[in-house]
Image (cartoon, helix red, strand yellow):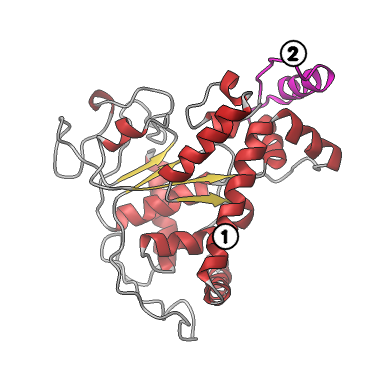
Amino acid sequence: MSLLLIATILTLYSRFTPGPLPFNVSRDSRWFTTQPSPITPSTCQPAENMVFIKTHKTGSTSLHCIFCRYGYANKLSFVFSTRNTKDGHIRKEHLNQSIILPPIGGFVNSSSKYNILTGHVSYKRKTINSFMEDNPIYVTILREPATHVESHMNFFSQRKQVMASMQAFLKKPRTSKNEAGRNNQLREFGLSFESTLNERIVNETIMTLDKEFDLVLILEYFDESLILLKHLLCWSFEDIIYLAQNQRTTRETITDTFRHNVYRWSNADYLFYNYFNRTLWEKIRQFGPRFEIELAHFRDLLKEHSKQMAL
């Protein structure tokens, strides 16, 4: 991770906390609000071992910063690449001992174990687990396919290629093999482009990922997702406070026609997103009426933080 990004995260963290930083941070929420928290304190132990598979253009940097802030504050060891001095992401490079920084207080060898992997990395669970402390919690995040395609193609300056791929499919859906921008979210979990065109393989992969991931967050319901993450990790509200990162100032308007075309053309991502959007809301339903109380309290904290950051 670049020194600039680390400095930014710690600077933001210092704006959120009244005491010394970064390691002796209080979890007391009295300085966030004058009202008592409506939530009964939990007796569970905060999780320290986690894997966040960071996906492109899904709001993942905001979540990445939450994990980084928590790890820095609690002196946890991160899996970071020595070859990527900008942000430490492994990306598509094979994860092995020769390319990662040593854990805190140790050195890299076959017994090196880490607490947190948060970043772009090829999803190869067995390999990832070999570097992690026991039983890490796995999470990721997805985005509604039409807005994802719009964001992805414009951010990476691939609009011409992506639109050509979509138009070629719409003209000849059975023979079009142009993969530019198509089913990108599911492909980040190891599926080849050809496999994303096979609905049986797609559905089997979704079922496998449902078993392997403890939580799949949804960008369109980011606050709701963070409440579930808070309980999954046994964290505090302060641990999940965030500022939105990497937001563009201008976006194309998503028309109904564009959305419909994306759902046909990038159908694997449509199935992927729909499945985990449904599971998210099922978890919320199971949570019960207390969920709305926690969500309202969390959003009050976010508003107060926004005011503090504007000072």
Q: Quadrant of residue 56?
A: top right
- Pointer 1 or 2: first along the chain: 2
91 left or right, relative to 222: left
Q: Is residue 54 visible?
A: no
Q: Which residue range is magenta in the image? A: 156-180
Is residue 181 inside the magenta stretch?
no
Q: Nearer the viewer, residue 33 or 270?
A: 270
Residue at (38, 22) in percent of width and height? 93
Q: Residues within 10 Å of mark 2 (few under 14, many from 20)?
A: few
Q: Nearer the viewer, residue 182 or 300?
A: 182
Q: Residue furthest front?
A: 200
Label 2 residue SS: loop
Q: Nearer the viewer, residue 26 or 181?
A: 181
Where in the figure is residue 121, as x and y percent of width and height? 42, 32
Q: Quadrant of residue 42?
A: bottom left
**Type of the residue with mark 1:** Glu
Q: Which residue is mark 1?
A: 282
Is residue 165 inside the magenta stretch?
yes
Q: Which residue is mark 2?
A: 175
Where in the figure is residue 248, as x and y percent of width and height? 66, 44
Q: Quadrant of residue 232?
A: bottom left
